[in-house]
Image: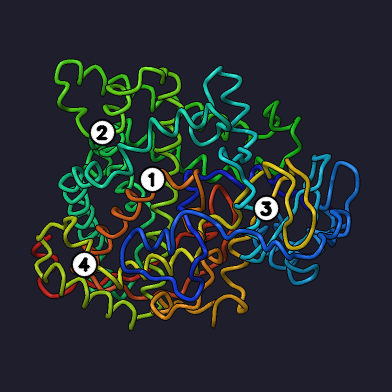
Amino acid sequence: MIARVPSAAALQYRLCAAPAYRISDTSKVSARSWASLANPASSSVPAPNSAAPTPKPFDAIPSVPRVPLLGSAIEFGKLEPKDTGKKFHHVVKKLAAKYGPIVRLRMPGYDRDAVLVTDPDMVADVHRNEGPFPKRPGVLTWLHMRERRQVPLGVVFENGHEWKKLRLAVQAPISQPKNVNAHFPAINTATVQAMTNLEQGLREAGPQTLAGKDPFVMEDLVMRWTIEAVSEVILGQRLGALDAHPNPLARDMVRTVNAMGETTGPVVMLPTFIWRNQLTRTAREHFTAMEEMMDVTRTLMDTTLTECARDPAKLQGTFLGHVLQRDTSITRADLLSTTVDLLIAGIDTTSRTLLNAMNLLGRYPSVQRKLRDEIVRVVGENPNVAVDAAHLAQFKYLKNVIMETTRVCAVFPINMRFLAQDAVVGGYAVPRDTEMMLGMEAIAHNDKFFADPDTFDPDRWDRGGIHPFAHLPFGFGPRMCVGRRIAETEMAMFLTHLLRRFEIRPSPAPDDVVFNIVLATATPMPLRYRPLNGATAAV
C-alpha cells in the first residue's frame, strides 16, 4: 500500500515564524534575555560570498524518485513504512541521511518540485532570499473552509501587502513589553487556579497519586489554562475554562481545538476530492471543528464588544481594543479570522511546549533541581508570591530550559518559504517561487550541529558554538512570531508556579511522536507530581 503524506503546504500551519537574526558572530548564542533567545544576534542574514563558484544547475540537486499524482510518496513509504504521514519528521531525517542536506522532492498532488534543506547555512540562504514580504503556504483544508465561508485568510495565512497590513495592526498589542506586562496579574491568577486544580485532581485520584507514586495526565488542564491566559490577552477576559463549571463557550473551545488538532494531520493526507467533498468521517469532523471554532470565536468577540461598548476600559491593553481603536482599515471579518488563528496557535503551541518541558524535567531531575533553585532564588519559596516582569528579567537558566525544550522537542518540524527571487542555495541555482522546506527538527538532532543532540542539556546555550540558524524556535524574518513574547511569558510563569509547588517525576509511558497540527506524543503523557512541603496548603 502506498502511504499518503501531508502536502508541503500542510506542514506549515504555524503562528510563529520569525525572530530576526544576523550571523555576525556564529561562535556564541547567549540566553541572557528573552530577546537573545529568539534573536542570538540581530536583524539580518550574512551577505553571500562574492567569490563563490558558479552555482550548479537546479536539476543537479539530488532528487527523490517520483511518479505522476503520487509524487515521491512511494519513496517516503519505503523510508518510513508505518504511518508515513504522521511520521513525516522521520522521513525528513532519513531523506537527509540518504540524499544529503539538499534534495528535490515532489509532494503528492503537486506538479512542481519542492526543495528540502537540512543545513543551517542553507536555511540562511533561503531567508536571505525571502524578500520583504515572506511568502509561505497555508493548510489547504483551512484555506478551503475560509474561501467557502467568504472569510478573509487572516494574518497567519495571508501573503503580500494584505499580510503586511494585518501584521502591522496586530503585532503591537501582543508583542510590546508594556502591553504584555499589563496582563501579568490576570495570568498569575489563572496559573494559581491551575495549580489548585492540579492539587485537587491529585487528591481525587487517590493517595498514591497525591504522593507522587501514580501517574497523572495533565494535557487537559494545561490546555484549559492556556485558553485562559491567551483569551485574557486577546479578548481582555478569562473564559472560565478552569472553573468547576466552565463557561460553555470555554468547553466548546477546548473541544474544537482538540478536534482540529486530531483531524488536521489525517485529513491533509487524503486526496483533495475526498476532503473537499467530506467523504470520510474524519473529514466531516475536521470541517465541523473548524466551523465551530469560527462560530465560538465570533460569539466571544460579539459578547466582548457588546460588554465593552458599555465599559470601553475593559478593552484597554487588549489585542481587540488596540486594533479597534487604532486601525480603521481592519474589517470585522479580518479581525475574526486573525483572532481565530491567534487563539488556536497560541493554545496549541504553548500547551504542547509546556507539556514537553514537564516531560523533560521529569526525565532529567538534575535539570529540574537546578531550575527550581533558580526559581526559589529569584521569586522565593512562597508559592503565593506572584511572578512579575522583574522576576522574568532575572531568569537565565529558565530561559535556557525553554530554549532547549523547543530544540529537543520541536513543535514544528518544518518551516516553509517560497523564494522571492532566483537564488543560490547550498551552491545550487534555485528559481524564484520554489517552495523551500526547512527541516529544522532534523537540524536540531544532527550531531554535526549539536553535540549529543538527543540529550536535554540547557547549559549548551551558555557554552556557545551554535550556528544561529541551527535552531529557530520562533522562525525568522519579518514573519517573526507575533505571539513570541506572550508565549515566553506564559511558559515561564507556569513553570515558576509549578516547580515551587510540585516535584515532577517520570513515569514509563509510550513516547512516540506523531504529526497533527504540531508534533505531539501519540498518547497522553502521564507524569507523577509530588507536592512539595507546604505547597498544597498554600495553593
Numbered disc total = 4
| Discs 3, 2 touching: Cβ within 8 Å | no
Nearest the viewer among 438 and 187 is 438
- The numbered mark, 3 or 2, whose residue comes first in the sequence reads 2
Quarter holding residue 263: top right
Tag 4 residue: 394
Q: Residue furthest front?
A: 51
Q: Relative to 53, is 251 above or below?
A: above
- The numbered mark, 1 or 4, whose residue comes first in the sequence reads 4
Label 1 – label 4 distance at C-alpha: 21 Å
Tag 1 residue: 483
* Residue 212 image offset from top left, x and y in percent: 28, 74
* Residue 521 image offset from top left, x and y in percent: 52, 61
Nearest the viewer among 487 and 22 is 22
Left or right position of 363 against 179? right
Label 1 – label 2 distance at C-alpha: 13 Å
- The numbered mark, 4 or 2, whose residue comes first in the sequence reads 2
Label 3 – label 2 distance at C-alpha: 35 Å
Label 4 – label 3 distance at C-alpha: 37 Å
Label 3 – label 1 distance at C-alpha: 23 Å
Tag 4: residue type?
Gln
Tag 3 residue: 437
* Residue 137 image offset from top left, x and y in percent: 63, 39
Tag 2 residue: 318
